[in-house]
Amino acid sequence: MPAPRAPTRIQRKNRATILEAALDVFSRSGFRGSTVDQIAKAAGLSKPNLLYYFPSKEAIFNELMAGLMDSWLDPLRRLDADGDPLEEILAYVQRKLQMSRDFPRESRLYANEIVQGAPRLHGVIAGELKDLVEEKTALLQSWMDNGRINHAHPKHLLFSIWSLTQHYADFDAQVRLLMGDEDPFDAAPDYLETLYRRMLTPQS
Amino acid sequence: MPAPRAPTRIQRKNRATILEAALDVFSRSGFRGSTVDQIAKAAGLSKPNLLYYFPSKEAIFNELMAGLMDSWLDPLRRLDADGDPLEEILAYVQRKLQMSRDFPRESRLYANEIVQGAPRLHGVIAGELKDLVEEKTALLQSWMDNGRINHAHPKHLLFSIWSLTQHYADFDAQVRLLMGDEDPFDAAPDYLETLYRRMLTPQS
DNA sequence: CATTGATTTGACCAACTGGTCAAACTCACG
DNA sequence: CGTGAGTTTGACCAGTTGGTCAAATCAATG
């Protein structure tokens, strides 16, 4: 195994440019629908030049995914057992919604993968994500058992949060066509806050 | 233009077989990720034979989509202005959830298209679907104005129903990995009924 | 400015893809 | 059984794709 050299200035810049371009292309067309040439052109490089920085199309994709998963899990990690249950959940919902607004390409890339059966993500989902979900659903369950929020199936509660927030990124094309001039993100925060407040506020 | 002949028995059978196989393949890999050969193999035909029944890959896809859109819009069409508002909405939610359970491939095919910007669906979405959405959101708004259900942004309400119900089909891979042995559709109907009941039941 | 390693590229290749076509085969019907 | 329309296929084609490679260019260091 050759000792890994420290990356040069040019290497750092070009690898970053390539990953940015790849995110754009992959999130628009999925893995199989994207070509190395498209990514190269989007990055302003020739195809052989791009392949000088990454050994293959799949390598680009995997590096992108690895970086993605971490920021993906972060909002859930920050769900704090010591905070006020309802406010914690509402804050989590808003964090996820912000991510849909600010990083729609990342959301679509992820969605593309899952819709197609997550062939390249089984590992992460079954591992890191599952562990985190088990931990946090246990927390939700304890909040419910203590009467601090209304009862609801905790896993389905999580699914619903992911689903509702990511919908604005993943189905952006549809949402915008149907909303016309109105920016979906104007009313979405309020809508989701109201929804979860009404659903989870403990009934006396 | 040649007069269209009545389809023979073999034609009817093979065209149906092809569409069924195409649904399977397209819903798993999207349009660009699927090959005519895959579809042909899945249908038990040779590629030239398949192309004897459909002029092109795109033609198969379009016919599939045309058939899909109709059954897709149907549950919303059946939202009845004369029924009890809350029960109508809850029934709509359950109809959509049933469709996710019974026709997950159709849901994923649709999702695949939208995530990639709906390049082949602009027409239908901007036309038929938009008209239907305008009609039904007006109905929802009137129910809210009359105090028969709680206030909420009607378009976001629709989006949330689509999102929550289709999630179980579109993200099936993730949902099942995280739920382990438990069948997601065991608790989902109850979860969604509770969610929308708490959210929409008019507050006195 | 010379040299050496890092970077870039045009030309190329093998595999795959959507689609064509003429020839062969099958089947219902007289 | 013969015949003509309906059906099936092997061989083929042109365009695209992921990836390679040797040669050319560039940049930093002494």
Image (tube, coloured by chain):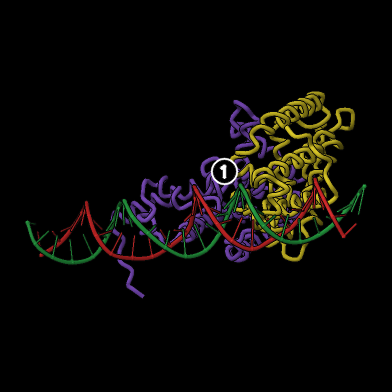
Chain colours: A purple, B yellow, C green, D red
Determine which residue is flagged by label 1: A100
Question: What residue do we see at 57% from left, 43% from top?
Answer: A100
Question: What residue do we see at 77% from left, 63% from top?
Answer: B182
* In front of the other: C3 or A141: C3
* In front of the other: A32 or A70: A32
With respect to residue B149, does A78 lie above or below? Answer: below
On screen, residue B128 versus residue D21, left or right, reads right
Question: What residue do we see at 63% from left, 31% from top?
Answer: A177
* In front of the other: A84 or B164: B164
Q: Residue A149's spot in the image, x, y percent?
A: 72, 49
Q: Residue A13's spot in the image, x, y percent?
A: 33, 51
Find residue A165 and report its image quarter. top right
* In front of the other: B182 or B7: B7
Q: Residue C26's spot in the image, x, y percent?
A: 81, 59
Is residue A28 something one can see in this rendering?
A: yes
Q: Residue B151's spot in the image, x, y percent?
A: 75, 30
Check the residue under mark 1 and report the chain it is in: A
Image quadrant containing the C terminus of chain A: top right
- Count of marks, rendered view: 1
Is residue A201 something one can see in this rendering?
A: no
Amino acid carrying mark 1 in the image: Ser
Q: Residues within 10 Å of mark 1 (few under 14, many from 20)?
A: many
Question: What residue do we see at 62% from left, 59% from top?
Answer: A118
Image quadrant containing the N terminus of chain A: bottom left
| Element carrying mark 1 | helix
